[in-house]
Amino acid sequence: MKWLSLLCLLMCVTSANAAGSEQRYLEQHYIDLRDRYIEKFSKAPENDETSKQHEAALKELAGVLRGRIGPVVIKGLPAVPQSNVDTLFKGDSGFGHLDGLAFYSKADKTEAVVTTMALLKHWLGEHREDGMPQEMGAAFKSDRFYYSAIQDAAFAKYAELPIARPAAASVAVAVLGLRGNGDIKGPPSEIDVVVIQGENVYFVAVRDAVKTAEIPACEQVWKQMMAKPINKKDPRGDMTREDQAMAAFTACFAKAAPNQSWFASAVKKAQSQIELLPLR
């Protein structure tokens, strides 16, 4: 009977290795195909035919990802996902979004992206020169990750939300922030959650998820920082001052947030997003 047990074990190992090889092949195939399309469309003329080809290319990329990730059901979101990469024209606004399958609610209030560990690591490396942290834990705590991964609007992280990690997950992170095309200083209302289970990475962003309020002490920090004189030797002195003021302001907000009356609701809302995910 021992030989039979050993044979079963070898068959399981062989099957697992074959599945792993196929997954790695599909991930590399996706990256190679995406890069070829980027090279093609970045040189293509802007016309109706190019637009049709571009749309077909995005559908093809989404199909490759579906083959790698498999069927995914996100509660309350459409069953058929799109490519989270929404442009293959280098230089376009929104170029370089996180490679993955994207699910959108009506009016795009909720967006979920599903990708793999390998694709995430590759994507982080591609954004190294943009200041993207290369270690996943640091990336998930960085404004840069949430800004670059989805949509076209800037994102400011205001606080981390202490959610409970599901038993089935190795990582669960939630942040409270504000996204916008202009001023991103104000009461934060967006909640973003990242969960890793096995080789799958889930990212959920919810706009207008919670109602918060200004924190007077932090508003005072902002005013004090903005009252400082501009460094005239710095060609972008006014922007530097504002960046420093924003950093001090959000640091103050993160420290004071847990004591605010709305904080528990924000944590609860973040925790509820995990229930949307197909964790097993």
Image (tube, grey):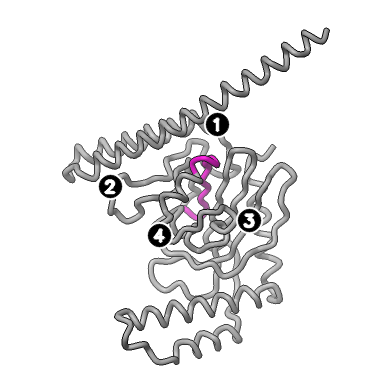
Looking at numbered disc 4 in the image, what kind of residue is underneath it? Asp
Q: Using a 10 Å C-alpha cutoff, classify the residue at mark 1 as few (fewer than 14 neighbours), some (14 to 19) or many (20 or more).
A: few
Pointer 4 with pointer 1, Cβ within 8 A: no
The answer to whether residue 182 is above or below residue 223 is above
Looking at numbered disc 1 in the image, what kind of residue is underneath it? Pro
Q: Nearer the viewer, mark 4 or mark 2?
A: 4
Where's residue 53, x and y in %?
26, 35
Q: Decide if residue 77 is on the left or right side of residue 53.
A: right
The answer to whether residue 42 is above or below residue 13 is below
Q: Residue 71 got which mark?
A: 1
Question: What kind of element bears circle 3?
Answer: strand
Looking at numbered disc 2 in the image, what kind of residue is underneath it? Phe
Q: Identify the residue at horizontal 50%, vertical 48% (top origin).
A: 105
Kindly report the distance in space between the C-alpha atoms of the residues bearing marks 4 and 2: 18 Å
Q: Nearer the viewer, mark 1 or mark 3?
A: 3
- Residue underneath mark 4: 130
Q: Quadrant of the C terminus?
A: top right
Kindly report the distance in space between the C-alpha atoms of the residues bearing marks 1 and 3: 24 Å
Between 46 and 235, the residue placed more toward the observer is 235
- Residue underneath mark 3: 173
Tell me if residue 113 is in the magenta stretch: yes
Q: Quadrant of the N terminus?
A: top right
Please, which residue is most extreme toward the right here?
A: 1
Between 209 and 72, the residue placed more toward the observer is 72
Q: Identify the residue at horizontal 64%, vertical 38% (top origin).
A: 198
Between 176 and 137, the residue placed more toward the observer is 137
Question: What kind of element bears circle 4?
Answer: helix
Q: Earlier in the sequence, mark 3 or mark 2?
A: 2
- Residue underneath mark 2: 89
Q: Which residues are magenta?
A: 107-119
